[in-house]
Amino acid sequence: MVFMNDQPRSYGGVDGALRVAQRRETLIEAGLELMGSTEPELTVRGVCKKAGVAARYFYESFTDRDALMSAVYDTVITDIAVSTQAAVDAAETERGKALAGIANIVRTIANDPRRGRLLFSSALTSPVLAEKRRASTTIFIGLLAANAKTFYRLDDSGHLTLTATFLVGGLAQTLSAWLDGYIDVTEEELVAECAAILLAPALPPSREPD
């Protein structure tokens, strides 16, 4: 067995650490392929077969299957969080920021449904993923609260957190239902409707008719 603290040697002119990093990326991609399938099942043997590497190389980067699952999830959620924040920052108006953020998330899971299943699928019931999902929900609540503070005009941080929590939870359930086919709308319609809901708390309350 190759242990994680072994020093990799150069081979064929390729630096040993680079080869380890490349194998790690390959294993993460294979893990995403298996975890994001319609019938997810992740084993060390299975992921090594999918990645095309010997099982002994698995332990260069991961202590066990749970460590790989964590790495796969972290890779996906970090990419979505960073790209979504970049899309929001690039937009100029409040509506534009909401549309850009929602569009990036929807486009990401539409272009790669494996990511959506990893984030939302009820078929993935691992305690490791359950904890990761709770943590990522907290991250996105924080991101929404930070970006929405200016246009929700809520001075009370408790109300802002409540609003952000409600919206993030609702968005996650909506995206899950859309991926499963329970919501029959186009990608563009989904983005427009979700953005409208996201912006609703920023609108002034409607007046009761006289």
Image (cartoon, helix red, strand yellow):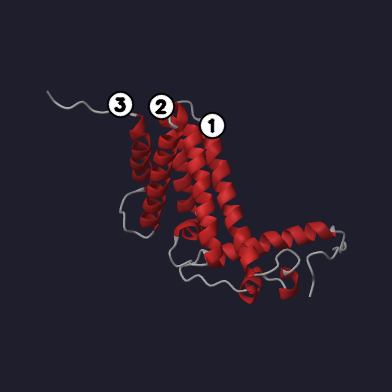
The residue that label 3 is drawn on is 204
Q: Position of residue 69 (x, y in %)?
A: 60, 63
Locate the N terminus by quadrant. Answer: bottom right
Disc on the earlier residue, 1 or 2 = 1
Disc on the earlier residue, 2 or 3 = 2
Numbered label attached to residue 89: 1
Q: Does the rendering let one see residue 46?
A: yes
The residue that label 2 is drawn on is 153
Q: Position of residue 144 (x, y in %)?
A: 47, 38
Q: Nearer the viewer, mark 3 or mark 1?
A: 3
* Residue positioned 68% across, 71% down in the render: 52
Q: Quadrant of residue 55?
A: bottom right
* Residue positioned 53% across, 45% down in the render: 139
- At label 2, the amino acid type is Arg
Disc on the earlier residue, 3 or 1 = 1
- At label 1, the amino acid type is Asp
Q: Quadrant of residue 123?
A: bottom left
How many badges with numbers are in the image?
A: 3
Q: Residues within 10 Å of mark 1 (few under 14, many from 20)?
A: some
Residue occupying the far left of the picture: 210
* Residue positioned 38% across, 53% down in the render: 173
> How far, Cα to Cα, is label 3 from label 1?
24 Å
Local SS, label 3: loop
